[in-house]
């Protein structure tokens, strides 16, 4: 049942990431000016400009109307915190209620509730959830794990943007870059959660339906056992902890330099590398940051005579 939702969600996310990646790749390719290559490059440069790279264009062009203050970066992390926290709580609740212990457990839900959420299968939703194989349960807890990493990232960035960074009142960014940032901080946690989000949503719907049928008085009290809440996370595989170690190192290193690629590499490893949307997420981070690095590198070369001409923007001896 959840496979249908999962198959629908993951291709949509992959298509969204491809749509975001292709313009960046096309702008980086040596497309002839006659074929629109120069125009595409200029458009993407304008859309991605912010701060120092946006000042010259905005001060001398009517395109300033299509910019917003760079301090709106705060919105990205507010959206990221809301989206990530919502997904984390939903999937963690689902994992706690139906994915522990890591063995099949007896059914305890009514058939009436399954009809209320639209199930027409010959077996109940409860037996479906309780019969999940051990590998699938680990997959759900692994999703909780990487969403915790994402939560740490967006909370830290929210704090830094509000209390550490001080944007100039004149600093601007293009509205398309602003929209891309909002898209990213919704699509990124969705991609990390995509492998089990549909079944978690279905479970929450089932719980609501059961509450409607039984009423609060007949519902069992929810008792949280901290060992069941945290122990499965401690029993995950080596790739999760290696990914977490890379993520933490990248987070600490980001205080001193741009280490976002290491942070999302850690998430990719922690996810086990089996979810296609997470690969597209990482590919988008690579292409987006690489394009931004090249544009910033060119800006420094134009503005500062003493800027090292032998320095490379992204890959040593390549570009």
Image (spheres, rainbow, N blue to C red):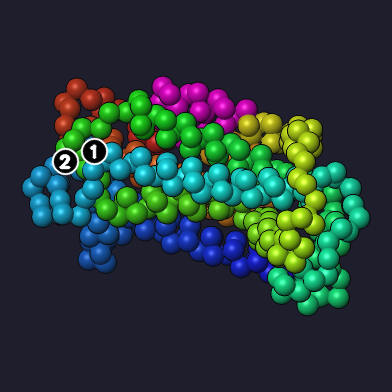
Q: Is residue 88 magenta?
A: no
Quarter of the N terminus within the rendering: bottom right
Say if mark 1 contacts mark 2, CB within 8 Å. Answer: yes
Displayed quadrant of residue 314: top left
Position of residue 191 relative to residue 297, above or below, is below
* Residue 319 disc label: none
Given the current orientation, which residue lies at the most extreme front position?
217
Which x, y percent locates residue 282? 52, 46
Residue that mark 2 sits on: 55
Asked whether residue 232 is in view, the answer is: no
Position of residue 297 relative to residue 82, above or below, is above
The residues colored magenta run 245-263
Q: Is residue 260 magenta?
A: yes
User: Depth check: 150 or 38 in front?
Assistant: 150
Residue depicted at 30% across the width and 43% down the height: 72
Given the current orientation, which residue lies at the most extreme left position?
60
Which x, y percent locates residue 42? 23, 54
Quarter of the C terminus within the rendering: top left
Which x, y percent locates residue 4? 68, 69
Displayed quadrant of residue 248: top right
Position of residue 119 relative to residue 147, above or below, is below
Q: Residues within 10 Å of mark 1 (few under 14, many from 20)?
A: some
């Amino acid at each position: 049942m959840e496979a249908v939702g999962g198959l629908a969600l993951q291709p949509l996310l992959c298509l969204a990431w491809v749509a975001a990646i292709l313009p960046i790749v096309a702008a980086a390719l040596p497309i002839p000016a006659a074929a629109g290559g120069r125009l595409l490059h200029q458009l993407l440069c304008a859309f991605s400009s912010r701060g120092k790279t946006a000042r010259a264009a905005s001060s001398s062009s009517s395109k300033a109307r299509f910019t917003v203050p760079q301090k709106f970066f705060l919105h990205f992390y507010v959206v990221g915190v809301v989206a990530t926290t919502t997904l984390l709580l939903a999937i963690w609740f689902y994992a706690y209620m139906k994915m522990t212990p890591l063995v099949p457990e007896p059914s305890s839900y009514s058939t009436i509730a399954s009809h209320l959420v639209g199930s027409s299968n010959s077996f109940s939703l409860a037996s479906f959830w309780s019969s999940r194989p051990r590998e699938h349960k680990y997959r759900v807890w692994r999703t909780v794990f990487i969403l915790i990493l994402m939560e740490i990232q967006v909370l830290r960035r929210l704090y830094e943007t509000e209390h550490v960074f001080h944007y100039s009142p004149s600093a601007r960014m293009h509205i398309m870059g602003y929209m891309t940032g909002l898209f990213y901080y919704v699509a990124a946690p969705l991609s990390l959660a995509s492998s089990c989000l549909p079944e978690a949503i279905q479970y929450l719907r089932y719980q609501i339906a059961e509450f409607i049928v039984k009423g609060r008085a007949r519902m069992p009290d929810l008792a949280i056992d901290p060992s069941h809440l945290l122990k499965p996370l401690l029993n995950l595989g080596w790739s999760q902890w290696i990914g977490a170690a890379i993520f933490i190192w990248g987070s600490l290193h980001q205080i001193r330099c741009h280490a976002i690629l290491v942070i999302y590499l850690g998430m990719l490893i922690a996810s086990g590398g089996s979810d296609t949307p997470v690969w597209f997420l990482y590919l988008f981070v690579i292409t987006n940051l690489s394009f931004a690095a090249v544009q910033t590198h060119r800006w420094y070369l134009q503005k500062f005579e003493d800027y090292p001409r032998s320095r490379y923007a992204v890959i040593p001896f390549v570009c």
